[in-house]
Amino acid sequence: MTVLKSPSQREFVAMMAMLFATTALSIDAMLPALPRIAAELTPNDVNQAQLVISLFFAGLGCGTLIAGPVSDSIGRKITLTICAAIYLLGALLCVLAHSLEMLLFARFLQGVGACGPRAVGMAMVRDLYRGREMARIVSFVMMVFALVPAGAPLVGQGLMFFGSWRIIFVAFLVFAVLVQSWVLLRQPETLRPETRRRLRVGLLVQAAKELLHHRIALISTACQALTSGCLVATLSSQQGIFEQRFDRAATFPLWFMLIALCSIAGSFTNTRTVVHYGMRAVVSATYAGQLGLTLIILGLDASGIMPAVLVFPAHILWSIGIFAMMGLSMGNLNALAMEDLGHIAGFASSMITAVSTVVSVLIAVPVGLAFNGTQLPLMIGVAVFSGLALALMQLVKRPARIS
């Protein structure tokens, strides 16, 4: 049997970034297609098209409940392969969907398949790194991975020049096959045989109890849910805001690219600061900055004090802050949660990702559906979410378990 040689750290980072990008591409490339989907499948209630984004996140969360424990038992690579097959089936059904209900079911299934890159990929990073070094690696991954969603809406819009919105799902099929092939051909299994855990209900219950008694993991999960809630709500509303509030639907992909590229500074800054200041300090400062920026812009805009010429630039600046917040917080929160949970890395990663994702959808959907042609409902929601996350981070003093 041929033994694969481990890739360099740079290749590993790039590989993980492309795995994570499968999820980002599946979300962001759909944004320009939402008006066409609404016109074709739900013309009487165009806001329902936002559920194409939300149901993907819901499937993503539910799938991770299974992917992590399975990967702890049978290995990371085979679990990724199974998830890839589910993802491809979901994408194919999206191509064939002729009703909103069918499309939403297919998107949920596609989200279930996308749980592999997210949860199992994070467990693979934890297999090889831990603590601040893990946070640093995750930040590099997030920085590279951010380049994909930056251009994803432009790719989606460009693909629709050659066909309907369904052609975007064909592109998803091709991208997923290429990335999965890269992993299979280049990355050795990261979970050593002696560390695998048999897939027993009793062992899962034991691991769940350990996770539920870990204060840092619980706080991290809640903060990740609130942070992801900000992102899901923003993604759901952003196309409508550009179209109805600013009359810039045609140039939305270009502005989205600018926002995403500028937000890479968040991940880059984290790689430079997390080792020196620590994960807790960086995350707390990030939430404080986002909350302050949101309240200032929200107050100026709602009161009418802000000059009309500055409203759009202020929204762009605020949007950059939302995406930068992901790069400055999510990797650190994952590393905080996983620092003492290496022996149940797959299960812990799955539980944390699943719970935080499902909760983020539950809190973000009302914000998205409250869209009224302005950015005010979104900004109010983000202010609440980031404020709660900041308050929770004040409870993180040192690694500890609930007694």
Image (cartoon, rainbow, N blue to C red):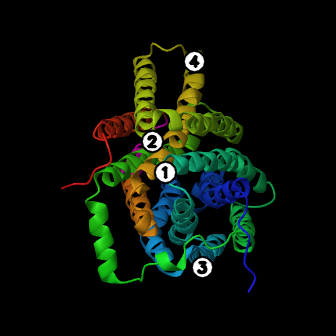
Labelled pair 4, 2 in contact (Cβ < 8 Å): no
Q: Earlier in the sequence, mark 1 or mark 3?
A: 1
How packed mark 1 is, by other alpha carbons closer than 10 Å (few <14, some 14-19, many 20 or more), is many
Labelled pair 1, 2 in contact (Cβ < 8 Å): yes
Which label belongs to residue 78? 3
From the viewer's side, name the closer residue of 219 and 130: 130
How many callouts does the rendering have? Answer: 4
Q: Earlier in the sequence, mark 4 or mark 2?
A: 4
Does the magenta-highlighted stretch encompass residue 346? no
Spot occupied by residue 229 in the image (x, y as percentages of width and height): 42, 47
Occupied quadrant, residue 371: top left
How packed mark 4 is, by other alpha carbons closer than 10 Å (few <14, some 14-19, many 20 or more), is few
Q: Is residue 368 visible?
A: no
Disc 1 designates what residue? 47
Q: Is residue 335 above or below residue 329?
A: below
Which label belongs to residue 235? none
How packed mark 3 is, by other alpha carbons closer than 10 Å (few <14, some 14-19, many 20 or more), is some
Cα–Cα gap, marks 1 and 3: 38 Å
Does the magenta-highlighted stretch encompass residue 366? yes
Q: Secondary structure at mark 2?
A: loop
Occupied quadrant, residue 93: bottom right
Q: Secondary structure at mark 1?
A: helix
Q: Which marked residue is nearer to the observer: mark 4 or mark 1?
A: 4
Q: Amino acid at mark 4?
A: Leu
Q: Amino acid at mark 1?
A: Asn
Disc 2 designates what residue? 371
From the viewer's side, name the closer residue of 211 and 260: 211
Cα–Cα gap, marks 3 and 4: 51 Å
Labelled pair 3, 2 in contact (Cβ < 8 Å): no
Cα–Cα gap, marks 4 and 2: 21 Å
Spot occupied by residue 20 in the image (x, y as percentages of width and height): 61, 58
